[in-house]
Amino acid sequence: MSKSRRRNLHSHRLAKANHFYSPDEVQALYGVCRNTVGNWLRSGLFCFEKGGRRLFRGDHLNDFHRARRDRSKSPCGPYEIYCVSCGGKHSLLEGGLTVHPGRTGLVRLSLACVEGRGRASQWITDEQWAEIKDATKHNPNGKNQD
Ligand SMILES: [Zn+2]
């Protein structure tokens, strides 16, 4: 568990603040694949588009990774699940949950990591699951299965 968090959380001091990085350079700097950089963009990493090319500024990269580290340290909110796969947290209200009935009074939630590396899962009580289902109904994007 701690091993995978270390692998997926990157230093916020690695990039040079005023340097511009191409996607290839970003991959080399953090030792990640192209897909991972694409996932970071979807998770809110900022990039410049110049002549059809993407450029990343070092201080944006550092800020992005610092924010991810900070998020992973703070406790989960009521409708969030901690993800050992990427070391972050994911909302339970945005759909894509799989629900496995467990022992009496418990269900196991499983959610595909948006970073594309695995699944986050967690045991909750039937009551908590009823609350999540109810909250999902009020979220127009929610598509959790019943
Ligand atoms: Zn994740």
Image (cartoon, rainbow, N blue to C red):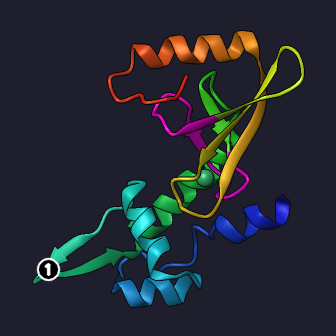
Query: In front: 90, or 65?
Result: 90
Q: Which residue is mark 1?
A: 50
Q: Residue at x 61, y 11 (%)?
A: 131
Q: Residue at x 18, y 74 (%)?
A: 49
The mark tally for this picture is 1
Query: In front: 8, or 17?
Result: 8
Above or below: residue 109 compared with residue 114: above
Q: What SS does tag 1 mark?
A: strand
Q: Residue at x 47, y 34 (%)?
A: 95
Above or below: residue 15 compared with residue 126: below
Residue 2 picture location, percent across and down: 84, 60
Residue 134 is inside the magenta segment: no
Task: Name the kind of residue labelled 1 in the image.
Answer: Lys
Q: Quadrant of the N terminus?
A: bottom right
Q: Report the magenta residues as a range.
A: 83-98
Give the side of residue 2 with respect to residue 63, left or right. Answer: right
Above or below: residue 58 compared with residue 96: below
Residue 85 is inside the magenta segment: yes
Residue 56 picture location, percent across and down: 33, 75
Q: Residue at x 56, y 81 (%)?
A: 32
